[in-house]
C-alpha cells in the first residue's frame, strides 16, 4: 500500500474471502490466519479482524479510499466446483451467489460492522459472481440490503454499494457497476458509474493500460491498475505512467512519513553513526546508536550501549517503518526535541586517484560516481526522470545530477585496479571519520 501510494495510488481493493490463511490458502496471511479461527462453524479470528481494521486505518491515514468485496464469490465458485476450500458449511457454500443463508449473512455483517468507522470505504457485493452457475439477481440485492441494514445498526455511515455482476447493474440496489472485461472502458453500464477493477490477462503493454486509464477518466469512469501477469518491469512502468496522470504532469511527492513509532527517538547525548558493507553489486548501509541503552533495550530486548535499529520480531509495522524512523534520526530527530523539517537518508563518499568527495551521479568531473540509490530491494533507475527507490522521500535529496542519498547505492568506477574506496556518511557529515562507515574497496565492476 505504501509503495504504490508513494507512486500516486489513492484507492485500494480488499477481497474478504472468507479464506483459510495458511500455507496452502492465501499464504501471505499464514502468520495471522484467516477470518475464522478454524474450520466451518468456528468463531472469529481476532488477529485477522484487527489487521483488517489496521489496514483500513492506514489507508485513511495516507488519504486513500478502499473498495471492500464483502464476499469473494470467486472463492465460492471454486468451492462449489470442489477445487478450493472455504471455511463455511457446505449449505452456505452452495447458497453463495444464489440465495441467502445464515453464515453468509453473519459474515457480511461482520465485514461491515468492523469497518463502521471507516468512512473512506465503499462496498461491492461480489467478485465475478456472474460466473457462479445458477446465480440470481435476488442474491446480489439481498447482499446490498444486509450491508445497508448493518451499516445502520452498527452506527456506520451510508456508503456506495456496487456489484461486479454486469447483468444486474440496472437494479436500484446498486450505486455503481464494476466490470472485468479485457477491453477499454468507453461507456457506463446501465447508466451507472462504471469501473474496470480487473482484467486477465493485462493489456499488451503498460502504455495500453495507461491509454485505457486516460480514456476512461475522460468519460468520468475509472480504470484501476491491475497487475495480473505483468513482469516487474512492466508493473513499474505502469505505476509510473498512472502516477503521471493523463496530462503528463508528475504528481507532487507523497506527504512525509509518519512521526509515530513504537519506540522513542534517541536521547540528545547519544551518538549516531554509519556502518556499511558490500551487497551484490553495490553497498548497503546501517545506522547505529551509541550511548542510549534504554533505546537499545526497547528495540532488542537487551540492555546494551550500542545497537542498530533492525528488529526481526515485528517491532516495525509495516517493515518500511524502520526506514522512516532512521530517516528522522539521521535528520537529527531526538527525544523531547522538535522534529527536523524532513527525514534524510545516508550520503556517500568516495576516495580514488587523489580525489575525495561526495559520490553522486556526476559522470563527467570525478573519477567515481554513484547511482541506483534507495534500498537493496527498491533502487532508483538513473535513466528515468522518476525516482523508483525506496523510501520515496529520498527523492528530495537531489542535485543537478539527480538523487544522491540512499541506504543502498551502486558505485561506478574505472575497475578494480583503480583502487576506489567508498563509505556511507550521515547527511551533512562527509569526511567525518568518527561517524562515517568504514572505507570499502570497490574490487568489483
Image: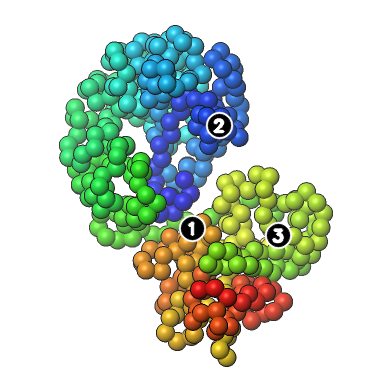
At mark 3, the secondary structure is strand
Q: Residue 23 carries which label?
A: 2
Q: Nearer the viewer, residue 241 or 248?
A: 241
Q: Mark 3 points at which residue?
A: 308
- Is 10 rendered above or below residue 324? above
Of labels 1 and 2, the one closer to you:
2
The structure residue drawn at horizontal position 61% and vertical position 27%, both measured from the top left corner, is 46
At mark 2, the secondary structure is loop
The structure residue drawn at horizontal position 54% and vertical position 68%, both measured from the top left corner, is 282
- For marks 3 and 1, the one nearer the N-term is 3
Q: How far apart are marks 3 and 2 (CA)?
A: 32 Å
- Give how far across and how far down residue 139 sits, in percent: 33, 14
The structure residue drawn at horizontal position 36% and vertical position 66%, both measured from the top left corner, is 384
The structure residue drawn at horizontal position 41% and vertical position 40%, both measured from the top left corner, is 12
Sort mark 3 into few (<14), some (14-19) or many (20+) by Cα contacts within 10 Å: some
Sort mark 2 into few (<14), some (14-19) or many (20+) by Cα contacts within 10 Å: few
- Give how far across and how far down residue 300 sits, in percent: 75, 51
Question: Is residue 417 shown left or right of residue 263?
Answer: left
Q: Mark 1 points at which residue?
A: 378
- For marks 1 and 2, the one nearer the N-term is 2
Amino acid at each position: 500500500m505504501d509503495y504504490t501510494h508513494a507512486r500516486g495510488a489513492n484507492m485500494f481493493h480488499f477481497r474478504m474471502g472468507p479464506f483459510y490463511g495458511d500455507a496452502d490458502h492465501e499464504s501471505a496471511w499464514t502468520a495471522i490466519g484467516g477470518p475464522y479461527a478454524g474450520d466451518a462453524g468456528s468463531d472469529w479470528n481476532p488477529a485477522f479482524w484487527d489487521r483488517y481494521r489496521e489496514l483500513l486505518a492506514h489507508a485513511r491515514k495516507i488519504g486513500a479510499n478502499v473498495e471492500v468485496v464483502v464476499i469473494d464469490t470467486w472463492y465460492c465458485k471454486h468451492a462449489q466446483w470442489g477445487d478450493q476450500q472455504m471455511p463455511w458449511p457446505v449449505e452456505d457454500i452452495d447458497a453463495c451467489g444464489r440465495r441467502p443463508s445464515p453464515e453468509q449473512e453473519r459474515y457480511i455483517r461482520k465485514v461491515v460492522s468492523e469497518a463502521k468507522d471507516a468512512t473512506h470505504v465503499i462496498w461491492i457485493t461480489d467478485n465475478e459472481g456472474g460466473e457462479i452457475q445458477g446465480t440470481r439477481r435476488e442474491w446480489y440485492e439481498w447482499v446490498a440490503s444486509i450491508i445497508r441494514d448493518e451499516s445502520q445498526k452498527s452506527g456506520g455511515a451510508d456508503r456506495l454499494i456496487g456489484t461486479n455482476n454486469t447483468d444486474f447493474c440496472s437494479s436500484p440496489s446498486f450505486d455503481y457497476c464494476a466490470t472485468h472485461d479485457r477491453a477499454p472502458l468507453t461507456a457506463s453500464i446501465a447508466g451507472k458509474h462504471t469501473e474496470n477493477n480487473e482484467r486477465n490477462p493485462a493489456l499488451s503493454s503498460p502504455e495500453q493500460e495507461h491509454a485505457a486509464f486516460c480514456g476512461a477518466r475522460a468519460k468520468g469512469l475509472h480504470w484501476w491498475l491491475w497487475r495480473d501477469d505483468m513482469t516487474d518491469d512492466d508493473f513499474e512502468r505502469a505505476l509510473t505512467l498512472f502516477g503521471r496522470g493523463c496530462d503528463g504532469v508528475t504528481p507532487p511527492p507523497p506527504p512525509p512519513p509518519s512521526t509515530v513509532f513504537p519506540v522513542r527517538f534517541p536521547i540528545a547525548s547519544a551518538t549516531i553513526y554509519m556502518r556499511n558493507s558490500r551487497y551484490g553489486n553495490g553497498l548497503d548501509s546501517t545506522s547505529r546508536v551509541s550511548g542510549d541503552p534504554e533505546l537499545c533495550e526497547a528495540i532488542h530486548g537487551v540492555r546494551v550501549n550500542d545497537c542498530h535499529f533492525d528488529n526481526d520480531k515485528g517491532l516495525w509495522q509495516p517493515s518500511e517503518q524502520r526506514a522512516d524512523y532512521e530517516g528522522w534520526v539521521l535528520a537529527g530527530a531526538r527525544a523531547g526535541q522538535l522534529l527536523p523539517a524532513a527525514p534524510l537518508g545516508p550520503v556517500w563518499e568516495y576516495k580514488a586517484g587523489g580525489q575525495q568527495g561526495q559520490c553522486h551521479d556526476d559522470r563527467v568531473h570525478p573519477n567515481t560516481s554513484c547511482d541506483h540509490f534507495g534500498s537493496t530491494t527498491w533502487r532508483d533507475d538513473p535513466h528515468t526522470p522518476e525516482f523508483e527507490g525506496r523510501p520515496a522521500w529520498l527523492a528530495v535529496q537531489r542535485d543537478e545530477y539527480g538523487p544522491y542519498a540512499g541506504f543502498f547505492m551502486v558505485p561506478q568506477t574505472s575497475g578494480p585496479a583503480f583502487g576506489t574506496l567508498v563509505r556511507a556518511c550521515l547527511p551533512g557529515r562527509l569526511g567525518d571519520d568518527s561517524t562515517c562507515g568504514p572505507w570499502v574497496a570497490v574490487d568489483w565492476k
